[in-house]
Amino acid sequence: LLLTGAIKGSRSMHRGGLVVAQVAAVSFFIMLLFGATAYLALTSGVLLTGTGLVLLGWNLVGRGRLPAGATPQAAPLDEPIAKEPLKGDNSPK
């Protein structure tokens, strides 16, 4: 298509060249559009898969199917962190 259009455009510069330029521009725009949508679909698919895996992991830990030690968890606030008094501690024993 591009070769025949280029040959026609070299013969009659006004008709064939403009048609080839329009066809090339439209096809390039369509390629850009498809490329952008494919890129967006790929990245959003990766993001959705990542968040889905994280949510699935949280769900499994919350239901007790995975051991809770598999995820880093903070110590509960109501438990004292140090069981024994530190040396040099002035608090009443």
Image (cartoon, rainbow, N blue to C red):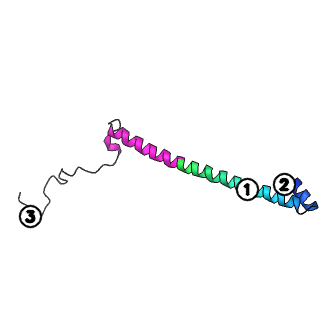
Chain part drawn in magenta = 45-71
User: What amino acid does circle 1 point to?
Assistant: Phe
- Per the image, label 2 sits on a secondary structure element best described as helix
Rendered view: 57 above or below 18: above
Residue pictured at 87% horizontal, 55% vertical: 5
State the image coordinates of residue 11 (x, y, percent, origin top left): 94, 60
Queried whether the magenta region covers residue 80, the answer comes back as no
Q: Nearer the viewer, residue 7 or 59?
A: 7
State the image coordinates of residue 43 (x, y, percent, origin top left): 55, 51
What is the quadrant of residue 53 in the picture? Answer: top left
Residue pictured at 85% horizontal, 51% vertical: 1
Per the model, the C-alpha gap separating discs 2 and 1 is: 13 Å
User: What amino acid does circle 3 point to?
Assistant: Asn
Q: Which of marks 2 and 1 is nearer the N terminus?
A: 2
Q: Tell me whether circle 2 and circle 3 mark residues in contact (CB < 8 Å).
A: no
Q: Tell me whether circle 2 and circle 1 mark residues in contact (CB < 8 Å).
A: no
* Residue at the disc numbered 3: 90
Q: Which of marks 3 and 1 is nearer the N terminus?
A: 1
Q: Which of 93 and 1 is in front in this view?
A: 1
Which quadrant would the C terminus be assigned to in this image?
A: bottom left
Q: Is the magenta stretch mostly helix, strand or loop?
A: helix
User: What amino acid does circle 2 point to?
Assistant: Leu
- Per the image, label 3 sits on a secondary structure element best described as loop
What is the quadrant of residue 19 in the picture? Answer: bottom right
Relative placement, left or right, of 24 versus 74 is right
* Residue at the disc numbered 1: 28
* Residue at the disc numbered 2: 2
Residue pictured at 74% horizontal, 55% vertical: 26
